[in-house]
Amino acid sequence: MSVKATQSVGDACEIQFVDEEKVENVRRAMKSVEAIGLLAETFRILGDPTRIKIAFALSKEELCVCDIANLLGVSQSAVSHSLRTLRQMKLVRFRREGKIAYYTLDDEHIANLFDEGFRHVEELL
Amino acid sequence: MSVKATQSVGDACEIQFVDEEKVENVRRAMKSVEAIGLLAETFRILGDPTRIKIAFALSKEELCVCDIANLLGVSQSAVSHSLRTLRQMKLVRFRREGKIAYYTLDDEHIANLFDEGFRHVEELL
DNA sequence: TGCGTATATGAACATGTGTTCATATAACAT
DNA sequence: ATGTTATATGAACACATGTTCATATACGCA
């Protein structure tokens, strides 16, 4: 989390490359720092039980804050904080109807991410 | 992270359900606690820049620890710790050849997760 | 206007996390 | 045997994170 490097960055290990060709292949296939950063951030946000439950629920139905809280057994405050985090990453979007805020998934890709993810974890169960 | 509940879990808000039918739909579509927990854990692990870079690299080529460290400009120790975390979640697997350990992605689903994820973040760039 | 309901948000706190540094293990070469 | 290379791991530290509690905003109704 902190970004200090005293030991060995640059030469990494004081070690030679074992297979420079493969390393070069990967280097070519590597995505931009920004894209990787955003993807990591996306996964990080979804890597919390409360937030993933909320996001998964919203992939099924549009829900208001309060129904989310009731459904998941989480406090209204916690839900609201979580929704903010999800919103900032553009994972959910909402519309307001009077005092009620209705949230949905912002992006179909996220639902696909869940499908693919559940296929992965089902092999671990 | 801590699991204390003093304010309002159970009745959540002191609020009524706004749309019980939608809530019931979601309840039926909900995955098991275990599956959701594992998926959250998977995303959490991939939600770190160093680990996602490593995992993405390994989705392209089989690499030894040292080449990963050189490629990414990260210390050998940090790579090794990261690989352990990825291993524990069965995201990567390795084979040993003498003193060299070669790592790869353990699961094709993870590569799909990257593809889908990058499709999502490309819309944010 | 005043009251209740729905949501948002800031501060504080306890807990979790990633890196580094130091060191261990283990294979290979000389 | 001894030294060198490749990897693994534990402890420690600085920092990030999620929840709660308290409160704010803002809409709707009497």
Image (cartoon, coloured by chain):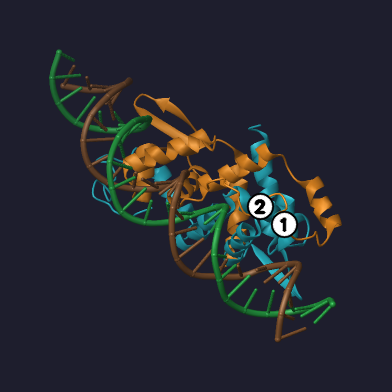
Chain colours: A orange, B cyan, C green, D brown
Q: Is residue C25 above or below residue A113?
A: below
**Residue at mark 1: chain:** B
Asked if one can make out residue A52 in the rendered structure from this viewpoint, the answer is: yes
In the picture of the structure, the residue carrying the numbered disc 1 is: B68
Q: CA distance from mark 1 to mark 2?
A: 8 Å
State the image coordinates of residue C27 (x, y, percent, origin top left). Answer: 75, 79
Which quadrant of the view contains residue B97?
bottom right
Q: Residue at x 62, y 47 (%)?
A: A112
Asked if one can make out residue A109 in the rendered structure from this viewpoint, the answer is: no
Image quarter in which the C terminus of chain B is found: top right
Q: Is residue A54 above or below residue A20?
A: above
Q: Residue at x 68, y 42 (%)?
A: B118
- Could you tell me the amino acid type at mark 2? Val
Which numbered marker is on residue B23?
A: none
Nearest the viewer among A102 and C26 is C26
Assign a secondary structure to mark 1: helix
State the image coordinates of residue A111 (x, y, percent, origin top left). Answer: 58, 45
Which numbered marker is on residue B74?
A: 2
